[in-house]
C-alpha cells in the first residue's frame, strides 16, 4: 500500500528496548523489551518476541512471551507459540498452535457481553 511505512527486524537480527512505530512491523529476528507498539505486526516463523504488545492487529507464526493487546484482530497460525494473555475483539487460532494464557474477547457494546448474552438467551 502506497505511503504505508514498513519496518522489519530480520532473521539474524536482535533488538532490545522499547519499540514504538507509526507503521507496520515484520519480525523474523528477536525482540525483547518492556513494550512493543505498532499498527500491524507480523511475527514470522523464526520471530521471537518477549514483550507486552500493543497493536491494531497481529499475525503470529513464531514465539511470543508476553501479553498481546490488539484493537482489531489476533491471528495465531499453526506454528505460533504464545505464553501470555490475549485481549482483542477477534481471535483466530489455527490447528497446531500452542497457547498458554487467558483470552479476553472485548467488544464495543454499550452493555457488557455477559448481559447481552443472558438477554439473548431469555428472548428465545
Image: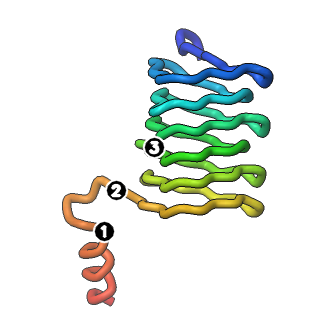
Q: Are marks 1 and 3 in contact (CB under 8 Å)?
A: no
Residue 17, x across and y down, in percent:
51, 23
Q: Is residue 97 left or right of residue 101?
A: right
User: Dot 2 lies on which element?
Assistant: loop
- Which sits earlier in the primary sequence, circle 1 or circle 3? 3
Q: Is residue 60 left or right of residue 55?
A: right
Instruction: In the rendered view, tell whether residue 12 sits above or below residue 60.
Output: above
At horizontal 43% and vertical 53% (from top left) the residue drawn is: 87
Residue 3, x across and y down, in percent:
53, 10
At horizontal 52% and vertical 30% (from top left) the residue drawn is: 33
Q: Is residue 2 left or right of residue 111?
A: right
- Which sits earlier in the primary sequence, circle 2 or circle 1? 2
The residue carrying mark 1 is 113
Which dot marks residue 70?
A: 3
Given this view, does label 2 or label 3 mark the residue nearer the observer? 3
Q: CA distance from mark 1 to mark 3?
A: 18 Å
Q: CA distance from mark 2 to mark 1?
A: 8 Å
Q: Are marks 2 and 1 in contact (CB under 8 Å)?
A: yes
- Which sits earlier in the primary sequence, circle 2 or circle 3? 3
Please tell me which residue lies in front, 102 or 76: 102
The residue carrying mark 2 is 107
Instruction: In the rendered view, tell whether residue 119 sits above or below residue 102.
Output: below
Q: Are marks 2 and 3 in contact (CB under 8 Å)?
A: no
User: Dot 3 lies on which element?
Assistant: strand
Q: Residues within 10 Å of mark 3 (few under 14, many from 20)?
A: many
Marks counted in the figure total 3
At horizontal 45% and vertical 18% (from top left) the residue drawn is: 22
Amino acid at each position: 500500500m502506497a505511503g504505508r511505512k514498513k519496518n522489519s527486524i530480520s532473521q539474524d537480527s536482535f533488538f532490545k528496548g522499547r519499540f514504538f512505530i507509526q507503521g507496520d512491523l515484520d519480525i523474523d529476528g528477536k525482540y525483547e523489551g518492556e513494550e512493543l507498539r505498532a499498527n500491524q505486526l507480523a511475527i514470522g516463523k523464526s520471530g521471537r518476541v518477549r514483550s507486552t504488545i500493543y497493536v491494531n492487529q497481529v499475525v503470529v507464526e513464531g514465539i511470543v512471551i508476553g501479553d498481546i493487546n490488539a484493537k482489531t484482530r489476533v491471528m495465531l497460525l499453526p506454528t505460533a507459540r504464545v505464553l501470555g494473555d490475549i485481549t482483542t475483539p477477534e481471535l483466530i487460532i489455527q490447528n497446531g498452535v500452542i497457547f498458554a494464557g487467558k483470552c479476553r474477547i472485548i467488544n464495543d457494546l454499550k452493555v457488557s457481553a455477559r448481559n447481552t448474552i443472558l438477554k439473548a438467551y431469555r428472548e428465545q
